[in-house]
Image (tube, grey):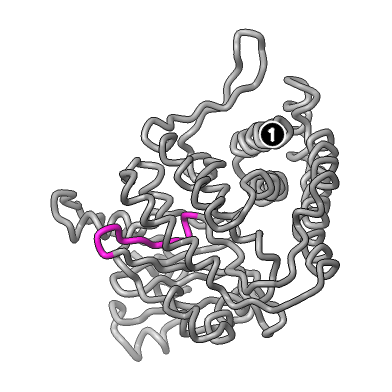
């Protein structure tokens, strides 16, 4: 089955003769493998947790392998893999209980990887999209997530320094990503489709509109401190057990030095908001539909039966902690615009992000 040519057998005879075929790992390397599928009984909590704790798909430029005990994440972006791995060791001790510890970093030349223990917890994105949160449970979840954000270590800084970091994250990065997207042939094709449906939906007009609003509210991004940032606490990176109030974060943006840990205090909040208020996880998991109205206008359709009443709970918690939801949403709009080139492999998703960004800017402008 695996050595169909006598010539190949002769070439590999020394290795073949040294060990039986069924124990010779090299013989499998260039062969297609068939993996037996195991039926799951979803009435069994063990089987259900096995399914849900491995349900989130990786981005197209990452790979995730899952077995009974470990997650193994790998990527050709070796610097990012090392930064994610190093993050846990660099953060202050008080933050570590909230994070899943990585281990086993490897660099094989083309790719780098690290491992994490597999916790049989559904991520918050899965629970949110499938309507698993009741009001009391969601309130408790948001309280813990915002407790993590608001109790992060702080470092004093000037308002000007804070404003510069904000500009790097909320302006420079957006402009760079927009340029990258429009440099792609597929990006230009999607942008032309959006512009044909509504000129203001195209990426350049949306970017200009966003920048006008940012300049109008720029003073609101000035703080007297910096904070250590996870960098990507969207719901798919938050593991949560409602019964035990157990919250664990995975996949930080990462850092290679202590200096790289510090970021703008609003950035992580904007990431959380784009899961709660921005419906990012619905779009990212394909639970949406981009279509046309009778007037031939592009429209984004989402089923938010159980989630809509929970969103005001998050807004009230933001205000209780002293944050302006309008400013958080403005930062959130920048995320939808800046992530377009990262999701170019699913063009329909890009249109959904453009429609969502326009809706957020409409809301910020009307406020």
Residue 123 is a magenta residue = no
Please name whichever residue, 187 or 178, is drawn nearer the observer in this view of the structure.
178
* Quadrant assignment for the C terminus: top right
Where is residue 13 drawn, in percent x and y? 41, 84
Q: Which residue is mark 1?
A: 367
* Quadrant assignment for the N terminus: bottom left
Secondary structure under badge 1?
A: loop
The residue positioned 47% from the left and 56% from the top of the image is 236
User: Can residue 344 be seen here?
Assistant: no
Residue 237 is a magenta residue = yes
Where is residue 39 drawn, in percent x and y? 19, 52
| Circle 1 crowding by C-alpha within 10 Å: few under 14, some 14–19, many from 20 | few
The residue positioned 32% from the left and 51% from the top of the image is 137
Q: Which quadrant would residue 192 be assigned to in this image?
A: top right
Judged from this view, the residue extending furthest toward the top is 294
* Chain part drawn in magenta: 235-244
For residue 290, side relative to residue 331 (left or right): left
User: Can residue 210 be seen here?
Assistant: yes
Q: Which quadrant would residue 23 be assigned to in this image?
A: bottom left
* Vertical relation: 23 (above or below) 32: below
Where is residue 58 drawn, in percent x and y? 50, 57
* Vertical relation: 123 (above or below) 91: above
Please name whichever residue, 258 or 115, is drawn nearer the observer in this view of the structure.
258
Q: Which quadrant would residue 303 be assigned to in this image?
A: top left
The residue positioned 44% from the left and 72% from the top of the image is 72
Where is residue 337 drawn, in percent x and y? 71, 44
């Amino acid at each position: 089955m695996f050595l169909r040519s006598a010539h190949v057998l002769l070439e590999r005879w020394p290795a073949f003769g040294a060990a039986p075929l069924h124990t010779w790992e090299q013989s499998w390397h260039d062969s297609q493998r068939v993996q037996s599928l195991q039926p799951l009984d979803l009435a069994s909590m063990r089987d259900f947790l096995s399914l849900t704790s491995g349900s989130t798909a990786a981005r197209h430029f990452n790979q995730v392998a899952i077995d009974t005990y470990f997650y193994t994440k790998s990527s050709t972006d070796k610097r990012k893999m090392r930064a994610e791995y190093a993050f846990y060791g660099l953060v202050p001790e008080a933050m570590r209980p909230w994070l899943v510890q990585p281990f086993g970093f490897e660099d094989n030349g083309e790719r780098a990887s690290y491992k994490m223990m597999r916790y049989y917890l559904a991520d918050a994105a899965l629970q949110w999209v499938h309507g698993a949160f009741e009001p009391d449970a969601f309130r408790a979840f948001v309280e813990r997530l915002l407790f993590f954000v608001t109790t992060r270590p702080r470092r004093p800084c000037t308002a000007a320094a804070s404003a510069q970091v904000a500009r790097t994250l909320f302006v420079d990065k957006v402009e760079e990503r927009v340029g990258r997207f429009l440099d792609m042939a597929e990006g230009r094709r999607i942008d032309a489709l959006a512009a044909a449906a509504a000129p203001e939906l195209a990426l350049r007009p949306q970017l200009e509109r966003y920048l006008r609003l940012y300049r109008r509210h720029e003073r609101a991004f000035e703080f007297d401190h910096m904070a250590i940032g996870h960098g990507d606490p969207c719901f798919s990176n938050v593991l949560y057990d409602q019964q035990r109030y157990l919250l664990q974060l995975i996949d930080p943006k990462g850092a290679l030095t202590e200096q790289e840990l510090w970021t703008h205090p609003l950035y992580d909040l904007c990431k959380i908001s784009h899961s709660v208020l921005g419906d990012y996880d619905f779009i990212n998991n394909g639970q949406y539909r981009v279509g046309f109205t009778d007037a031939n206008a592009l429209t984004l359709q989402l089923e938010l039966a159980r989630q809509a009443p929970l969103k005001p709970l998050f807004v009230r918690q933001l205000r209780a902690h002293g944050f302006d939801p309008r400013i958080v949403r403005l930062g959130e709009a920048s995320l939808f615009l800046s992530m377009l080139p990262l999701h170019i492999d699913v063009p329909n998703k890009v249109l959904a992000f453009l429609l969502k960004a326009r809706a957020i800017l409409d809301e910020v402008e009307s406020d």
